[in-house]
Amino acid sequence: MLNKEQIKEIIPQREPFLMIDEVEQYIPGESCTAYKNIKEEEYYFKGHFPGNPIMPGVLMVEALAQTGAVAILSMEENKGRNALFGGINNLKFKKQVIPGDRLKLEVKIIKKKGPIGIGEAIATVDGKIAVKGELTFAIV
């Protein structure tokens, strides 16, 4: 299990844009399972939406991307580098994520060629899919 400080040793994101709270397990270059605890005081709930707080889909995707970045940037040859979006494919939003939810983030690296790769990404709440799709990344 990695805490936020240990996660920061692998990926460059920082608060308020660090979108994962803990890593349950990871295999460098292969996969990562992480969690985001959705708190009522998250900065984005002030405007999305007042009286009906819903985690923005783009931030769920960012949480998945950061989870994949833990897997790819924990490889010895990628330490100190960054992983940027190269594309998003077949992404579907299936469930709203609200304060009090614990978002489970799972990314499996399914393809790598040079600095480019693809991760199969799934976020769930209580076993129900919130979002899933493929994320393409570029290591820079």
Image (spheres, rainbow, N blue to C red):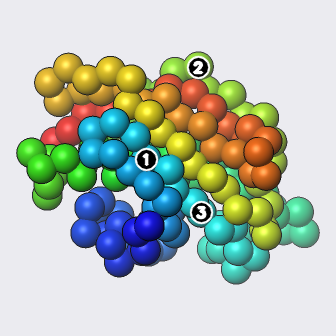
**Residue at mark 1 to residue at mark 3: CA–CA distance:** 13 Å
Percent x, y of residue 122: 60, 37
* Helix, strand or loop under label 2: strand
Above or below — where is 51 with respect to 107?
A: below
Out of 15 and 125, give the one closest to the viewer. Answer: 125
Q: Is residue 61 above or below residue 12?
A: above
List the residue tagged with mark 3: 36
Q: Which mark is residue 32?
A: 1
Task: Give residue 109's quadrant in the image.
Answer: top left
The answer to the question of whether label 2 and label 1 lie on touching residues, with beta carbons closer than 8 A, is no
Residue 23: give its label. Answer: none
Amino acid at pointer 2:
Asn
- Residue 136 visible in the snapshot: no
* Marks 2 and 3, the one that precedes in the sequence: 3
Q: Which of labels 1 and 3 is toward the front? A: 1
Q: CA distance from mark 2 to mark 1?
A: 20 Å
